[in-house]
Image: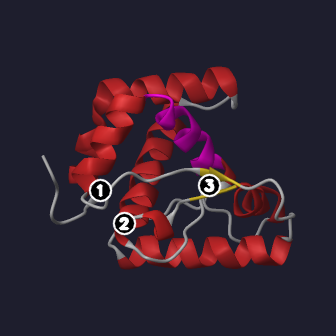
Amino acid sequence: MTITRHDTTSTLNLIGPSLGADLITMVREDYWPEITDAQGNRGVEQLAAFLAVAATTTEKVTPSLRVDLFWHVFVLHTKPYADFCDALGGGFIHHFPDRNSGHNPEEGRAAMRRTVGLIREAGYRTDPEFWPLDGAADCTQSYAGCSDSPVSK
């Protein structure tokens, strides 16, 4: 199944409740022990929106720290992750860690603002708990640490 119009419901259906629950469990066990089920469900939703945009834009997008936690555990589910990427219609979305680019808070906030803008333009809702545009701590890690790969699409 390839979705032709991206929206929260159709994109989330590509992940499904069972895989979503597993992603939440892994985030809880590996990174964020105090995450609630409600936060986890919102995290899966924000991940789906981020990846839908990453699949369809030629611009570099970068996740927030919290969205990146969900991306990390999703990538470990190689077959469902590859199927999800295929269904989005933009090819495999590679995850590129970049530990050498430094941690510039201003660049991090600017990258997150660009990404949030693209997510909203695509019709998705952004959750401020997962996209903290004003806080340096949560927004610089992924700018300096992880991004998608628009050039390899």
> Which residue is under mark 3?
129
**Range shown magenta:** 66-77
> Which residue is under mark 2?
124
Q: Residue at x 57, y 79 (%)?
A: 114
Q: Amino acid at mark 3?
A: Glu
- Kindly indicate whether the residue at mark 1 contacts the one at mark 3 (C-beta within 8 angstroms): no
Q: Position of residue 67 (x, y in %)?
A: 57, 49
Q: Residue at x 23, y 50 (%)?
A: 87
Mark toward the start of the polypeptide (3 vs 2) = 2
Q: Position of residue 64 (x, y in %)?
A: 64, 57
- Separation (CA) of disc 3 from disc 2: 15 Å
Left or right for 17, reference 48: left
Q: Position of residue 147 (x, y in %)?
A: 60, 60
Q: Nearer the viewer, residue 127 or 98?
A: 98
- Separation (CA) of disc 3 from disc 1: 17 Å
Q: Is residue 75 magenta?
A: yes
Mark toward the start of the polypeptide (3 vs 1) = 1
